Image: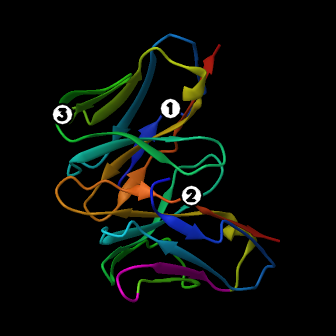
Amino acid sequence: DTGVSQDPRHKITKRGQNVTFRCDPISEHNRLYWYRQTLGQGPEFLTYFQNEAQLEKSRLLSDRFSAERPKGSFSTLEIQRTEQGDSAMYLCASSAGGRRNTIYFGEGSWLTVV
Amino acid sequence: QKEVEQNSGPLSVPEGAIASLNCTYSDRGSQSFFWYRQYSGKSPELIMFIYSNGDKEDGRFTAQLNKASQYVSLLIRDSQPSDSATYLCAGDTGNQFYFGTGTSLTVIP
């Protein structure tokens, strides 16, 4: 257990529905990342926060995806109008930043769109 | 586009042997590199990080970095069946970590 918590761990939803995932990072970490991973692939970067500021967002991310970190603590990732191609594991990671930045992943949230 | 290339494998080694995993990266500006282990259905787990050219040892694991060749490797000595997993190589741009597709390792008892 790295100390990064994700909820829910599993979500099955019908196509077209909205889903939201929550991530609670390690408490002293000011950086938070979201990744998506499908079978046989490495984690794909989605977005990055430093405190409450969203500093980078993947150009691959469609407008149906939005992420927030309102108080610089927990973060949410919302997917609107889900599609079957959104089925994946959504990974949250956090880090303390600095010169020797290292990220630690949560256990992931599995999304299945039917 | 920052990229990491890994041989997807599968790589099979007998128990007790040395497993050698390699990756190359495209971004010369990346300073830090990481190896994560991922068991099937689980999230990636940090094994090693390396920032300087040369070798870094931690128990049975040795990471090697050659910035001139843009090459990172991981050696696992005395491989155990519990080492069977996918190993992900990653680089850090400062704003994001970018990952390879992973190398699947099987250690045969």
Mark 3 = which residue? B68
Q: Which mark is residue A107?
A: 2
Q: In the rendered image of this protein, does residue B61 appear above or below residue B3? A: above
Kind of residue at badge 3: Ala
Q: Distance of mark 1 from mark 3, alpha carbons?
A: 20 Å
Q: Which mark is residue B51?
A: none
Q: Secondary structure at mark 2?
A: loop
Q: Residue at x 61, y 49 (%)?
A: B42
Mark 1 = which residue? B7
The N terminus of chain B: image quadrant: bottom left
Q: Residue at x 17, y 32 (%)?
A: B53
Q: Which of marks 3 and 1 precedes in the sequence? A: 1
Q: Is residue B37 left or right of residue B90?
A: right
Query: Within the magenta stretch, is there residue B89?
Result: no
Q: Nearer the viewer, mark 2 or mark 1?
A: 2
Q: Residue A85 is drawn in which quadrant?
A: bottom right
Characterize the local packing of mark 3: few (<14), some (14-19) or many (20 or more) Cα atoms within 10 angstroms: few
Check the image and name the residue furthest to the bottom.
A70
Kind of residue at badge 1: Asn
Q: In the rendered image of this protein, does residue B45 appear above or below residue A59? A: above
| Tag 2 and tag 1, C-beta contact below 8 Å | no
Q: Distance of mark 2 from mark 1, alpha carbons?
A: 25 Å
| Tag 2 and tag 3, C-beta contact below 8 Å | no
Q: How many labels were placed on the picture?
A: 3
Find the magenta span and give its range. A70-80
Q: Nearer the viewer, residue B108 or B64?
A: B108
Q: Residue at x 24, y 50 (%)?
A: B30
Q: Is residue A82 left or right of residue A25?
A: right
